[in-house]
Image: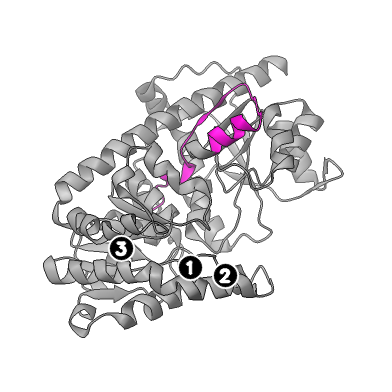
Amino acid sequence: MPLPSSTRREFLQQAGLLSASLLASHIGLAMGQKNNPVILLRSGWQIENIGDVAHTPAFLALMETYLPGARAIFWPHYAILPQTEIDMLMLRFPRLQIVRGKVVNGKPDSAELEKAFAEADLFVHNSGPAMIGWAEAEAFKTRTGKPFGVFGVTYGLYGKQERATLPKADFVYFRDSVSLALAKQDGITAPIMAFGPDAAFATDVVNREAATRYLKANNLQPGKFVVCIPKQRHTPAWLHKAKNRPVDTDRQARNEAMKEHDHAPMREAIIAIVRQTDCKVLIGHEDETELPIGKEWLLDKLPDDVKKGVVWRSEPWLLEEALGIYRQSAGYFGHEQHTPIMCIGNGIPAILGRWEEQSSKGIMWNDIGLSNWLFDFDREEDIKRYVPTVLEMVKKPVEAKKYARKAQELVRRNHQQGFKAIENAINKAQKQG
């Protein structure tokens, strides 16, 4: 459920907001714009995964911190934007404008999008699995003559299109070092090319009331439970109702073939936590298709004595409730990738599992100093150290939080550096305009 309006003040306080003037003074960034800058943000890649939902409010939170005088226009990529997401965004960012429309033959097909092109000083392609919006970035630059930039993407999905578009950007931040190296190898030479963590680290939308209510209903004590999320080798997008895709039988077969290999170590970790510590385990989800496998692949296969210390989230949750629960946990382990990103961004320990079917995104755990918490499930030597590492995170919470916060600080410094590039691009656009 979206936050009721009566909780708005509490929500804003929980997000740790300060006035724009105090923020500007606190961070000490030199704002040189003649006018309050406007950023056209291309984001919102899908709605079925709370990790993807997090990209947009996270970037807006970064804007609020590092460009407090700026205004954002959110241009969703996905055709569907649920009212719950709109409510969440408008409650947290009441000045936000949302526009609809497509680029057709290089031009906006709606009056509101045409106006957004005219008003914006800069087009920013938000974090994602690739430069999904390459055509829109090209159209913006060609039609307006103003710059665009890319903030924290993985590289390689679109090949030819990305290689043609990225060199035209004022800045390109790749969310993992593998992507950065590959882009350089492919001869991409944008003015600024560097490592830039996924925007989702900055997610701060929280419904503390809903989170607390859920924890109490399930007898989960703050700091005395860990979150665990399963994942299939290939996200079964054919189960996403809004996408209306046919079943990919090859991918489905691969998921079935690897489910025991990938989740037996997770069950072993759950058993160790429940039997050896006073912590419980909450089996959650990031993508809506993970709800049933949390029960079938994890909970149902646990010993009866362990099940007593495990809670399975049986209903979908909104981003703001999920993050509120993560913040009160002792940590995370699992195969999803944006939940650990959000955890580390909020100072919560997070252990990440990955495999060859995923992109290089997970390598960012090495890039932010968390190599001890990155596990390649295609390497048996990694799997062997999985349970001991998860158990150590739970048994040594002080050390685990220290490790997480060191990474959190590195991410913050990188985000600040990225926003200096954004500020410079805006300054250039306003001088030219």
Residue 215, quarter of the rendered image: bottom left
Q: Label 2: which residue? A: 236
Give the mark nearest the N terminus, 2 or 3. Answer: 3
Residue 181 is inside the magenta segment: yes
Residue matched to label 3 = 227
Residue 375 lies left or right of residue 43; in this view the side is left
Report, in whole angstroms, how far the alpha carbon at label 1 lies from the one at label 3: 17 Å
Label located before the other in sequence (1 or 3)? 3
Observer able to see residue 154: yes
Residue that carries the numbered disc 1 in the rendered image = 232
Q: Quadrant of residue 401?
A: top left
Residue density around tag 1, few if under 14, some if 14–19, many if 20 or more, within 10 Å? many
Q: Residue at x 44, y 78 (%)?
A: 292
Q: Mark 3: which secondary structure?
A: strand
Left or right: where does residue 20 sit relative to residue 396? Answer: right
**Direction bottom: furthest residue:** 304
The amino acid type of the residue labelled 3 equals Val
Q: Which mark is residue 160?
A: none
Q: Nearer the viewer, mark 1 or mark 3?
A: 1
Helix, strand or loop at label 1? It is loop
Residue 21 in percent (x, y) is at 42, 26
Q: Position of residue 369 (x, y in %)?
A: 33, 37
Could you give the CA–CA distance between mark 2 and mark 1, rounded to whole angstroms?
8 Å
* Residue found at x 56% / y 75%: 253
Of residues 235 and 309, which is closer to you in this image? 235
Does residue 249 show up magenta in the picture? no
Residue 18 against residue 27 in the figure, above or below = below
The magenta region covers 179-206
Could you tell me which residue is drawn at 64 percent across and 25 percent down?
A: 190
